[in-house]
Image: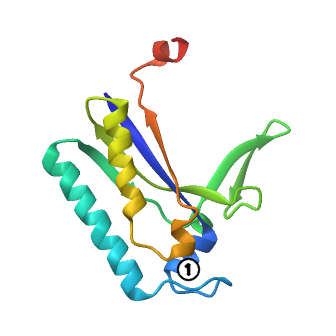
Amino acid sequence: MKYMILTYASQEDYDGMAGKDTGKPAWQPEDFAAMGAFMEKLNNDLAESGELVETRALAAPVLTRRLGSKDGQSVVTDGPYAETQEVLAGYWIVECESFDRATEIASRLADTPAPDFVRATAYADIRPIIDGREALME
């Protein structure tokens, strides 16, 4: 079974990682390097176990466009969005034996090196990937 592990961040988080003043302590270069090394090891471990299907980090929310409709007309809005504090920051698609194993994999993210104020609010979602619309009816 395939599962998607999703992580989230705000524009403020992206700015802090880039060393910008957000009113919270900025990430230090060594913080960012430690996070990168951790993610690289996690990805390599999952690739070696054969469980990694794909993983990607996403650009900052300020670089996002949202498509919708208003009064029957298509609308494109550039990010970031005042109504949404946190957005999808990255994901892993893993193929493993069970939801419990996917949860075990995602739980490793709790060990991601980051400033304490970032770690205090970090979370991830794990969702099964379905193969067709029939699975939505189950």
Residue 100: image x %, image y %? 35, 34
Tell me which residue sits at (51%, 67%) in the image: 119
- 21 in relation to 124, above or below: below
46 on left or right of 55: left
Q: Is residue 50 above or below residue 42?
A: above
Counting other residues with Cα less than 10 Å from the Cα at mark 1, is it few (<14), some (14-19), or many (20 or more)? many
- Residue furthest left in the image: 48
Q: Which residue is located at x 39 percent, y 50 percent?
A: 107
Three-letter amino acid code at disc 1? Answer: Gly
Residue that carries the numbered disc 1 in the rendered image: 16
Q: Residue at x 59, y 56 (%)?
A: 87
Q: Establish if 122 lies above or below 3.
A: below
Secondary element type, mark 1: helix
Q: Nearer the viewer, residue 110 or 3?
A: 110
Quadrant position of residue 42:
bottom left
Picture coordinates of residue 114 (x, y %)? 45, 73
Give percent across and percent down for residue 57: 41, 60
Q: How is the image coloured?
A: rainbow
Quadrant assignment, res 104: top left
39 left or right, relative to 41: right
Residue 112 is drawn in which quadrant? bottom left
